[in-house]
Image: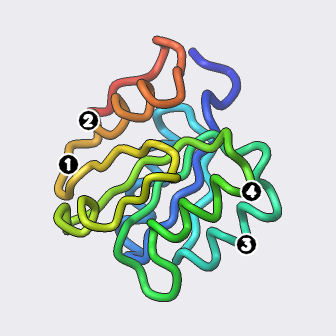
């Protein structure tokens, strides 16, 4: 059993049920999660606690500040932050990338929680004790 959180994950997701679902699943997998309702709230969270955030899990399409802009600002402030986008609009992800952006992965909705946990494990280098979600 893992005693301390494996990674600190910041979720930026404007859909309340998806945000709650992701938060519960990632906490169950042993991660520490901070969740925000949109890109702007996530930006302020990164300003406040950015050094401890290992991974930004962001929806690409959000009102206010989208996930792409959020990731660019986040990596400028804290270059160590890893990025994983979730989206139902994979064409948007392909079209908006920039050359100066930190490499990011895209996970298309719908996805299985085990796939999400596996991606996060690979990205942040989490130990093999990661729990599988049933």
Q: Residue at x 45, y 66 (%)?
A: 68
- Viewer-side label of 1, 4: 4
Q: From the image, tell me which residue sits under label 1.
A: 111
Q: Residue furthest front?
A: 99
When asked about the image quadrant of residue 117, the answer is top left
Q: Residue at x 63, y 64 (%)?
A: 73
Residue 77's disc is 4
User: Of helix, strand and loop, which one carries label 4?
Assistant: helix
Q: Is residue 78 left or right of residue 82?
A: right
State if disc 4 and disc 2 touch (CB < 8 Å): no
Q: Is residue 111 left or right of residue 85?
A: left
80 over 23 or under it: above or below: above
How far apart are the alpha carbons under marks 1 and 3? 28 Å
Q: From the image, tell me which residue sits under label 3.
A: 44
State if disc 3 and disc 1 touch (CB < 8 Å): no
Q: Mark 1 vs mark 4: which is more N-terminal?
A: 4
Quadrant where the N terminus sits is: top right
Viewer-nearest residue: 56 or 11? 56
User: Of helix, strand and loop, which one carries label 2?
Assistant: helix
**What crowding class fits label 3: few (fewer than 14 Cα within 10 Å), some (14-19), or many (20 or more)?**
few
């Amino acid at each position: 059993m893992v005693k301390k959180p494996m990674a600190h994950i910041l979720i930026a997701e404007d859909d309340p049920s998806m945000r709650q679902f992701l938060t519960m699943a990632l906490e169950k997998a042993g991660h520490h999660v901070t969740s925000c309702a949109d890109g702007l709230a996530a930006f302020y969270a990164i300003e406040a606690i950015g050094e401890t955030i290992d991974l930004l899990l962001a929806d690409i399409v959000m009102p206010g500040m989208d996930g792409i802009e959020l990731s660019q600002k986040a990596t400028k402030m804290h270059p160590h932050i890893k990025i994983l986008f979730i989206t139902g609009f994979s064409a948007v992800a392909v079209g908006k990338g920039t050359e100066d952006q930190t490499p990011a992965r895209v996970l298309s909705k719908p996805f299985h929680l085990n796939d999400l946990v596996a991606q996060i494990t690979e990205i942040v280098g989490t130990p093999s004790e990661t729990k599988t979600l049933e």
